[in-house]
Amino acid sequence: MLEVFVDFDGTITDVDTFDALVRAVAGDAAWDAIDGPLLAGELTLREALERQAAAVRLSRAETLEFMLTHARVDPAFAPFVAAVRAHGGAIRVVSSGIATVIHDALARAGIEIDVIANDVDFAPAGWTMTFVDPSDNGHDKAAHVRAARERGDRTVYIGDGISDFLAAVEADERYAKTGRALEAYCRERNIPCTSFTSFAEIERALFR
Ligand SMILES: [Mg+2]
């Protein structure tokens, strides 16, 4: 059976909603002070997310309103989900982002799909993260892919960023958003990967 795992931020949406939120609320300098050490490997993704979340002081309602303009779902994603299912496959979203935001954005796009993601406590003094598991990423996406492979499934991973590196390597086939960190990661390591900008391209590649 085909099992497709999809990142949310920057993959299903055109921007990383958590990045956009932290930049808008806490400022670019606050963002860069966390993102620099993350990219340099001095912070784990888990630590970076905790620091970013602590810098955000928005209510749940304010956050969802912000996302109305920032979390734009690729219009080709709903047809892609339908195509995977029509071919007998399974598809789920695996994210290091905020489950509350993801559920809201996908519901607005009329998409029903399983979502495994971190979440936040919308505390007025700064958010605290709720992680999926104790891993350095806060959500060990690679574990889901590994479990599917152990079930004998053909696995496909679709992503864009740091949180996708290990899961993408674990999959039988991988798709990386053009111009983002996952694409560079695969190129530098000679890991076969197909670049994409829209889910329509992945649909054609998988089911042509
Ligand atoms: Mg992403």
Image (cartoon, grey):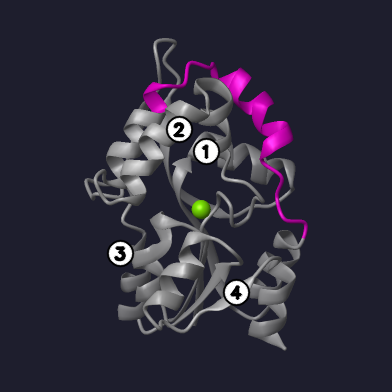
Q: Residues within 10 Å of mark 2 (few under 14, many from 20)?
A: many
Residue drawn at point x = 31 percent, y = 56 percent: 140
Q: Amino acid at mark 2?
A: Trp
Q: Nearer the viewer, residue 204 or 180?
A: 180
**Cβ atoms at labels 2 and 1 below 8 Å apart:** yes
- Label whose residue precedes the other's in the sequence (2 or 3): 2
Q: Nearer the viewer, residue 56 or 184?
A: 184
Q: Residues within 10 Å of mark 3 (few under 14, many from 20)?
A: few
Q: Taking 205 as reference, is 139 left or right?
A: left
Q: For mark 3, what is the residue?
A: 143
Q: Amino acid at mark 1?
A: Asp
Cα distance between the residues tagged 1 and 4: 22 Å
Residue 19 numbered mark, or none: 1
Residue 195 numbered mark, or none: 4
Q: For mark 2, what is the residue?
A: 31
Residue drawn at point x = 63 percent, y = 27 percent: 64
